[in-house]
Amino acid sequence: MTPPSARPGSWYPLTFGGLVCAVFGWNVYRAATLGITHDEAVTYQWFVAGGLERIYSTDGYDANNHVLYSLLAWASVRLFGLSEFALRLPSVLAGPLLLIATGRLFWLLAGSRVLSLIGLVVVALNPLVMDFQVAARGYGLGLALSVWAWHELARSLVSPEPRRLLAVAICQGLAVGANLVYAFPNFALGAAFLILTVVWAGPAWRATLVALACWYIFPAIAIAFALSVPSLSHLGGSRFYYGTSSLAEMVLSLVEPSVYALADRGPWGLPPDLPADGPGPCTYLLAIGFAAMLAPLPVVAQRVFREPARGDEWGLLYVFLAGGTAGLIVVLVGCHWVLGTLYPKDRTGLYLIPLGVGCLLLVLRRMREAGPAWRSLAAGVSLALVVLGGLFATQTQADYLYQWRYDAGTKRVYRLLAERAASERGARVGHDWIFEPALNFYRETSGERSLAPFGRDGPDGDYDYYYLEARTARDWVRAGRLRVIDEDPVSGSVLGMPARRERSR
């Protein structure tokens, strides 16, 4: 009898399952070992520590409060006690959901298990996506719920099943509750699905629309509304979420951690900087390629709407995903010009990564069904994706989270300060304000009280010790103001003492 591992086709579930387990295990390790970062500590101190009343408060709104994530983190911390891992647990558990949903969506889009696995590797190992499968923020959770919903919508187009839509509504509503930025892609993809479904309904379009409203539209809105109460009075403008006013910087902010991070450009200061010279050739090439993938949309949409037939699976999926993505760009531009809402930037545009790869897989599927020249081009692009995925794999690390590299050494520095404070009662610490949340987090988790609570006054003043980010420390050393005790090899942040103290001794 042939063993299961040798049966034809068994390689895919083994490979897929192995990839999911490997990435999940790596995420668990990083979540347990990486020091807490600025934004994660702020999430705890400002919201999670205050419990349900603070999480749901409409006063003192801050975009850091990702309501669904804050609720789950609050439950995790109450259950397991305060630690980096407990605070990050909702993101870690959302990781397998994201990978499984992405793999299922990509298989449906690509029509090829090999291509779907290549696309999954590119998304799963992307440095930005990897970090938000760990960080105690709502972005990874929202992405996982969104991708799962998009897969179910795509399945419903190919093989309708009305009961599936209630689950989709729940996922999309929860995704918006995890982070409001997911309102944009879920609205755009949902609108594309609704348009396709209502057009196909023909004379029965009214009854179809009523059924969609009952099973899909209203439940999704109700759930999203219930989880967005604290932020509804603060929509629009620059306070809505972290972003940029430039479309070029939007693209660059996704390319930078995804591609440019492959080349080590040295430590960052406050916060990680985009290249000073702005978008480079790589960024513009990717933007042009992204636009090229959407270029056939008018022709394909005209054919699909002129002859509604679910037999053209590729056309349906392309109009749904590419049409939804194009609609998303229109919505982002419209909200920017009308409401003053910023364009997404790095983590707030995380959803563009699986959408872009998904559109590319659809294009590759079509090219593989065309003539020899197109098939050769598709093979070349597929090989480039394999190389990119391999480069991502070589860059996996457990030293820092990209957006908060300056905090890579804060946990170790706090321990050094606590050791010194134990023998030097009343020791005072001056520090850059960016380190305040993480330092206070470790002060609370350690139970150490020989150090006073850390504030946001900055490092200027007469202190016994200074904890400075890389650029500030460099300036102080050059000016002869600081004697270095410890320099973090990852972030370049420095723990030091006043230089005058050494001279007086």
Image: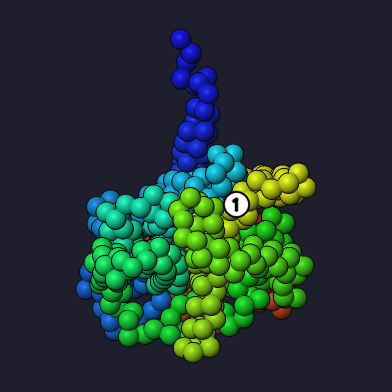
Q: Is residue 174 left or right of residue 402?
A: left
Query: In the image shown, does 58 or 154 lie closer to the viewer?
Result: 154
Q: Quadrant of the C terminus?
A: bottom right
* Residue at the spot 29% in from the left edge and 78% down from the top edge: 230
* Residue at the spot 52% in from the left edge and 19% down from the top edge: 6
Give how far across and how far down residue 100 sits, in percent.
44, 45
Residue 47 sits in which quadrant? bottom left
Q: Is residue 397 left or right of residue 90?
A: right
Residue behind mark 1: 361
Question: Is any part of residue 148 visible from this angle?
Answer: no
Give how far across and how far down residue 86 sits, in percent.
34, 53
Q: Is residue 110 left or right of residue 81?
A: right
Query: In the image shown, does 140 or 201 lie closer to the viewer?
Result: 201
* Residue at the spot 69% in from the left edge and 48% down from the top edge: 370
Question: Is any part of residue 239 visible from this angle?
Answer: yes
Q: The disc labelled 1 sits on which kind of residue?
A: Leu
The residue lying furthest to the left in this view is 53
- Report the coloring of the rendering: rainbow
Query: In the image shown, does 135 or 442 lie closer to the viewer?
Result: 135
- Please tell me how many numbered marks the rendered image carries: 1
Compared to residue 445, the image places residue 63 above or below, namely below
Structural crowding at the residue carrying mark 1, measured as other residues with C-alpha within 10 Å and reported as few (<14), some (14–19) or many (≥20): many
Secondary structure beneath label 1? helix
Compared to residue 153, the image places residue 500 above or below, namely below
Give how far across and how far down residue 88 sits, in percent.
39, 55
Query: In the image shown, does 101 or 272 lie closer to the viewer?
Result: 101
* Residue at the spot 76% in from the left edge and 44% down from the top edge: 372
Give how far across and how far down residue 112 sits, in percent.
57, 41
The residue lying furthest to the top in this view is 1
